[in-house]
Image: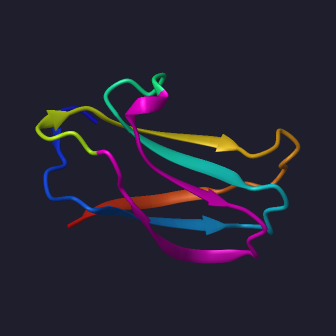
Amino acid sequence: YDNIDLDGIKSIELAYGVPAKLEKGYIISWYQDDPANATNKIGEVKLENLESSMLTKTSVPLQNVKAGVHALYFKVEKVDKNESNRLALISFRLLN
């Protein structure tokens, strides 16, 4: 997402669904600007060993947020390539 001002934003509320139990899980990370640079990571949550659910929400605290307008990226990765179940990302909301 381009041109996002995160001044005053303290966390991200993530809404997701799990059609079938996650065995290994997923890691979801948020970055300001370049997602290839680990120093730009501002938040992360690991979702593992979760039972099936239609809608679950979790709040992810943000750290090291740079002031001003930046690009915001999020990355979804499997904890283990053998994770065979899906994760449905429904929404995320910026919270102050």
Badge count? 0
Q: Position of residue 34 (x, y in %)?
A: 38, 23
Please give left or right for residue 32 compared with residue 7 in the image. Answer: right
Where, quadrant-wise, is the C terminus in this rendering?
bottom left
The image quarter in which residue 73 lies? top left
Q: Position of residue 17 (x, y in %)?
A: 60, 67
Q: Where 22 falls versus 42 (above or below)?
A: below
Looking at the image, which residue is at 35% across and 55% down?
62
Where, quadrant-wise, is the N terminus in this rendering?
top left
Looking at the image, which residue is at 27% across and 62% down?
10
Looking at the image, which residue is at 48% across and 22% down?
36
Q: Where 40 falls versus 12 (above or below)?
A: above
Looking at the image, which residue is at 82% across and 55% down?
24
Please give left or right for residue 64 compared with residue 6 in the image. Answer: right
Q: Where 76 falls versus 70 (above or below)?
A: below
Range of residues picked out in magenta: 38-64
Please give left or right for residue 64 compared with residue 47 in the image. Answer: left
Q: Position of residue 21 (x, y in %)?
A: 80, 69
Is 55 magenta? The answer is: yes
Please give left or right for residue 85 compared with residue 2 in the image. Answer: right
Q: Position of residue 54 (x, y in %)?
A: 61, 76
Q: Where 85 falls versus 19 (above or below)?
A: above
Is 23 magenta? The answer is: no
